[in-house]
Image (tube, coloured by chain):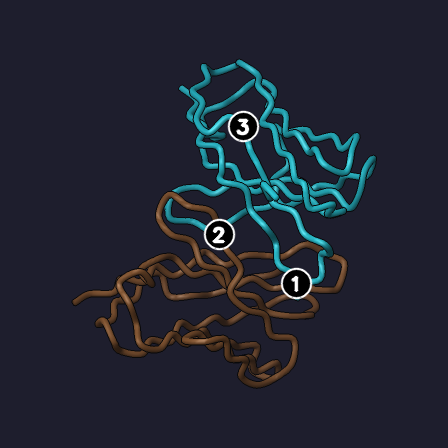
Amino acid sequence: NAGVTQTPKFRILKIGQSMTLQCTQDMNHNYMYWYRQDPGMGLKLIYYSVGAGITDKGEVPNGYNVSRSTTEDFPLRLELAAPSQTSVYFCASSYSTDASYEQYFGPGTRLTVT
Amino acid sequence: GQSLEQPSEVTAVEGAIVQINCTYQTSGFYGLSWYQQHDGGAPTFLSYNALDGLEETGRFSSFLSRSDSYGYLLLQELQMKDSASYFCAVSKSGNTPLVFGKGTRLSVIA
């Protein structure tokens, strides 16, 4: 199993540009998450999904959109990129939101907006 | 509201024992998890406590006191490879996502 994969690994955007961060998992997990991590900080939840066709906002959803058309894929869309969106983005998946079930994280996408 | 407090940095000597504390204030509590993250890497799951007491997994142990809204991660026989950031995370219910603390950066020195 590849686990959780993310593309791209690195990206530089100009202010106002848009992009989609890709996330795929092959563990047949229903639950998927997008986090952002600023330097020296913890993980902040952007959006999450409890299954195909169902998404919900996390703590910091503004400026982002998601979709979940399949169990495997959970892309994150940035519209009109701003410098405040410079961060490392992690996608994760789990069997359940119950914390006893481990969240598996992808390797991250390092995004710079200039 | 909700908050999790952890020390920002801890330094310990190779071979020693270190304890990383986590206090939480959340509207609802279901369990406390710990994750490890090496520089440039992704977080990985270490442990989970739902009930009071100590859970042991090899050199790592995690403790929870629900009445004190407090937990800690205990690392024994420290190795250089244990230098990393450690995050506590709280789940407020069985079907809501985790809330992560800001993390504690552990430096293991010779």
What residue does disc 2 label? B43
The correct choice, above or below, for B36 with respect to A58 in the image is below
Q: Which tag is nearer the camera, tag 1 or tag 3? A: 3
Q: Could you classify mark 3 by the number of other residues whose Cα lies within 10 Å: few (under 14), some (14-19), or many (20 or more)? A: some
Q: Which tint is chain A? A: cyan
Same chain? Circles 2 and 1: no
The image position of residue A36, as x and y in percent, is: 52, 40
Q: Quadrant of the C terminus of chain B?
A: bottom left
Label 1 marks a residue whose chain is A
The image position of residue A17, as x and y in percent, is: 53, 14
In the foreground, B49 or B98: B49
Mark-to-mark CA distance, 1 and 3 = 26 Å
Which element is circle 2 on?
loop
Position of residue A49 in the picture relative to residue A88 (left or right):
right
The correct choice, above or below, for B59 with respect to A91 in the image is below
The correct choice, above or below, for A29 with respect to A11 in the image is below
Residue at 71 percent of width and 41 percent of height: A57
Which element is circle 1 on?
loop
The image position of residue B38, as x and y in percent, is: 38, 52
The image position of residue A67, as x and y in percent, is: 74, 30
**Could you say which chain is coloured brown in the image?**
B
Residue at 43 percent of width and 58 percent of height: B103
Asked if labels 1 and 2 touch by Cβ distance under 8 angstroms, the answer is no
Label 2 marks a residue whose chain is B
Q: Could you classify mark 1 by the number of other residues whose Cα lies within 10 Å: few (under 14), some (14-19), or many (20 or more)? A: many
**Disc 1 residue type (three-letter):** Ala
**Disc 2 residue type (three-letter):** Pro
Q: Quadrant of the N terminus of chain B?
A: bottom right
The correct choice, above or below, for A41 with respect to B64 in the image is above
What residue does disc 1 label? A99
